[in-house]
Image (cartoon, coloured by chain):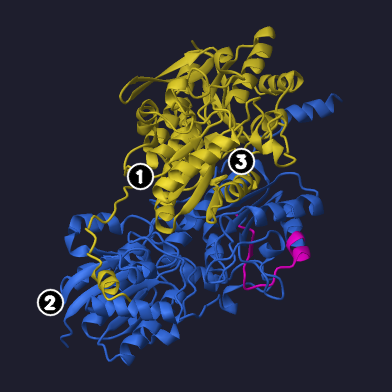
Chain colours: A yellow, B blue
Amino acid sequence: MSLKGKMLIAQGGGPTAVINQSLVGAILEARRNPNVTEVYGALRGVDGIVNENFLDLDFETEENLERVASTPSSALLSTRAKPDREYCRRMFEVIRHHDVRYFYYIGGNDSSDTVRIVKEFADRADYDLVAVHIPKTIDNDLMENDHTPGFGSAARYVTQVFQGVNQDNRSLEGVYIGIVMGRHAGYLTAASALAKTYEDDGPHLIYLPEVPFVMENFLADIKEVYERLGRCVVAVSEGICDDKGNPIITKLVEAESDAHGNVQLSGTGALGDRLSQEIKNGLGISRVRVDTYGYPQRSFAGVVSDVDAREAREVGAMAAKYGRDGLSGSVVIRRTGDYVVEYDLVDLEAVAAKTKVMPKNFINKKGNHVTEAFIKYVKPLVGSSLPETARLRSPQVERTFHQKMENTGE
Amino acid sequence: MSLKGKMLIAQGGGPTAVINQSLVGAILEARRNPNVTEVYGALRGVDGIVNENFLDLDFETEENLERVASTPSSALLSTRAKPDREYCRRMFEVIRHHDVRYFYYIGGNDSSDTVRIVKEFADRADYDLVAVHIPKTIDNDLMENDHTPGFGSAARYVTQVFQGVNQDNRSLEGVYIGIVMGRHAGYLTAASALAKTYEDDGPHLIYLPEVPFVMENFLADIKEVYERLGRCVVAVSEGICDDKGNPIITKLVEAESDAHGNVQLSGTGALGDRLSQEIKNGLGISRVRVDTYGYPQRSFAGVVSDVDAREAREVGAMAAKYGRDGLSGSVVIRRTGDYVVEYDLVDLEAVAAKTKVMPKNFINKKGNHVTEAFIKYVKPLVGSSLPETARLRSPQVERTFHQKMENTGE
């Protein structure tokens, strides 16, 4: 195939620690394709396409691209705009005007849907356009993918957070709750389970959006752990819902919604503060601490899964390879061994605007922790050389002072 | 000198990422002292001394001690108990009963005061006891010290957080506020300034406990940055106070206090949520996001300043060396070059129950950021190999589509 023309690439939705790896993977691979006349990057996702805000990426040195690749968050900036059909039509008009023949969009399921609609406009206009969706999301909720780029690094961050707060809670006791990102899928919250080394390490309890949240059960679970260990570490997804599927947080605050109708879950401590109050009042435990981890989960600089970084780079490169061969679709990651992955291209419809949640066999029967099957699934994704935690192993000294006091009746 | 007897070591107050380095430094150095007959560790700080909960640390292998050294949080566990004189007297009784002659306590200024009182009881009873306070605190607020072990690693974590959230905010815009730990001293919040690489990087504004917080100024500052850059990243200390020295957070929630009379500042999102509301209402900016970083700042596993880890190890080792020579006091760190430190021993009175805050020359005139003098001070403390952030440098493409549209009147 020899479709000659420009390439246009953009990044959409929430940033990740490795989304720039995909950007750089696609750019470098495209540079090897003689049919790509120029490589443009749209600023602020779809917004930059409609408003024709393009960077001419041919000017980038490989050295700077490598530095950008290891910088968290979207180097081409992002947007929360949700394109309707008219918006997509205008995107297509700009794409046609610039003789763009290769269109790559790095994003989640909403971004995939946008690519699908733009490609439809091109097809109807008999305009040859290759359109490829490159997956990313820390939520790990894209259909057809074993997992998504961005998830592994966020999961590694969450693991390291819980390794630390578990030690902290062991040291000062009480109940500790960590609120983890995840609107519909609990994968990221569930990854906290990797923090466990010793049998009595936290997180002792994990609450996911996939399991209806019942306050009484939550309190009873904490009571049981607290009475047994004198402490309790809990991981709670910001997206926990009641049995009707309504987010618990909407009962607490007048939540803000974005253009996708998504209620704001992050960037507020409301859910955590409410849960803390319930535990103090309901269980009479005085030391209850809650952290809502927020944005560092997706953009902390310097905590990256090497496996995630490599795969993010590869989905970008593969997109450009599929594009070179004239193939449109969504790049997906398939696990083909323990641990090996392969890449594939599926129809945009298979990924667009759908959400994958945790399968039943990843969640324990009581719905308050994960299974070994999940641990086996998630462990390779967080990468190599996780920090280790260790404890002192010395025996206790005999309490002779207190024995003496008792004997002398003091 | 040849004072023969046991050594007792304990850890108090809030954990840090490197407090176990000090523990291990003291233990290993003590093993070289033939006059130390046994090395005991008290569990849960002063509580473990009064209740005679000791581990016989001679059983620890060096291999396990090294693993413990690199594990965050107090391996001997901690306590928030604040000993009064009677409590200290009982500590001394237990110490005497076990023929402890070397007493080391790793902690902040409250811990230093405890060591001072216990030593007083020993002196009055003509009991030969070496008592050394080993400094630690992420707040960096101990007198006589250029800086304290634990601060550098926490500062590194805060730097990496702001490197990431600055990229995130650049990508999706709006106002972002990060609430950083620090009750009276703003050092940790101020360390966020190290995240700046490009001229327009955040944090654009920094609010410290040392500067009285005025809501109108806060809003005006944010408005100015937001109008100039279309975004704003703000670092706020959890300990910000009004002009009468009352913490802003106490006006917002019925705050809980500990045995030291310290109001609970961490483990709640109340301050952040309130500031967010003020900005939304006062400035009409819709996208305002707040994270309260909480406990990961002091116990995140895997983000450690190599300089901090080394110095934490050395203050522990130095304490044992001073002890061997029969000297009591508080180990302090002095900066003697750029960058070199030396250790010294000062009277416990000089450190005990006092608080060091940021000097005026570290805070800018407007009281909403730091100075170059502070950057020079803090930079070596966060250690080597900080993550780097990079941006694309390509030129913008001419907007020919929009020009055409304008020309054709579309």
- Which chain contains the residue that carries disc 1? A
Q: Count the numbered circles shown.
A: 3
Quarter assignment of residue B357? bottom right
Marks 1 and 3, how far apart at CA: 56 Å
Of the two numbered discs 1 and 3 in the rendering, the one whose residue sits closer to the viewer: 1
Q: Disc 2 to disc 1, how far (Cα)?
A: 37 Å
Residue at 44% from the left image edge and 36% from the top image edge: A191
* Residue behind mark 3: B395
User: What residue sits 60% from the left and 78% below the top?
Assistant: B360
Identify the secondary structure beneath mark 3: loop
Q: Element under label 1?
A: loop
Residue A109 as seen in the image, left or right of residue B159: right
Chain under callout 2: B
What residue is shown with label 2?
B34
Q: What residue type is labelled 1?
A: Asp
Identify the residue at horizontal 43%, vertical 55% (top origin): A168
Residue A120 is labelled as none
Nearer the camera: disc 3 or disc 2: 2
| Quarter of the image where one finds residue A386 | top left
Report the magenta residues as a range: B202-219
Q: Which of B116 and B173 is in front in this view?
A: B116
The disc placed on residue A200 is 1
Mark with earlier residue (3, 2)? 2
Q: Do labels 1 and 3 share a chain?
A: no
Labels 2 and 1 in the same subunit: no
Residue B353 placement, left or right of B117: right
User: Where's residue B154, x and y in %?
Assistant: 46, 60
Chain containing mark 3? B
Q: Can residue B93 be seen in this view?
A: yes
The local crowd at label 1, few if under 14, some if 14 to 19, many if 20 or more residues have their Cα within 10 Å, is: some
